[in-house]
Image: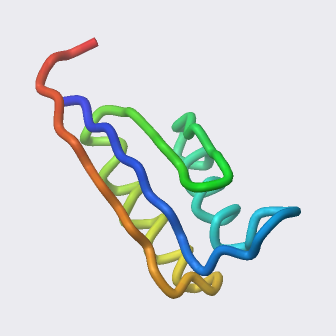
Amino acid sequence: MILHAEFTTEPFEGEGEPPEHAAVARDCLTEAGLEPDFGPLGTAITAEREALLPALAEVLDRALDAGATRITLQVTADDRRS
C-alpha cells in the first residue's frame, strides 16, 4: 500500500535556515532511503507503507529531541500500487 504523508514541525523560526527540528525530520527520511519534498512550510513524502511508517516514527522521535514543540502529521492511504 502506498502512503502519502505531510507534516510540519514547530516552532517556526521565520526566514533563513530551517530550524534544527525541521532539518532533522527531513534528514531522517533521506537516511531511510526515502525522497521527501522539503519546503518552508512542511515536508511531503510518498512511499510504501512498510518503509514509511517506521521512518515517520523516527521523524517524530528525533524532531522532538531536536526541539520541536508540535508536529502536525497527516497520512493518506492509497491502495493503488504505482
Q: Is residue 68 left or right of residue 59?
A: right
Task: Establish if 80 lies above or below 52.
Answer: above
Residue 63 appears in which quarter of the rendering? bottom right
Name the outermost residue toward the right: 16
Could you tell me which quadrant the C terminus lies in?
top left
Residue 57: x and y, percent? 37, 66
Residue 35: x and y, percent? 56, 34
Which scheme is used to colour this image of the protein? rainbow
Task: Establish if 44 lies above or below 66.
Answer: above
Residue drawn at x 34%, y 56% is 54
Of residues 11 and 68, the one drawn nearer to the viewer in this rendering: 11
Residue drawn at x 30%, y 33% is 48
Name the outermost residue toward the left: 79
Q: Is residue 74 left or right of residue 67?
A: left
Name the outermost residue toward the front: 14
Residue drawn at x 41%, y 49% is 6
Could you tell me which quadrant the N terminus lies in?
top left
Q: Is residue 59 left or right of residue 49?
A: right
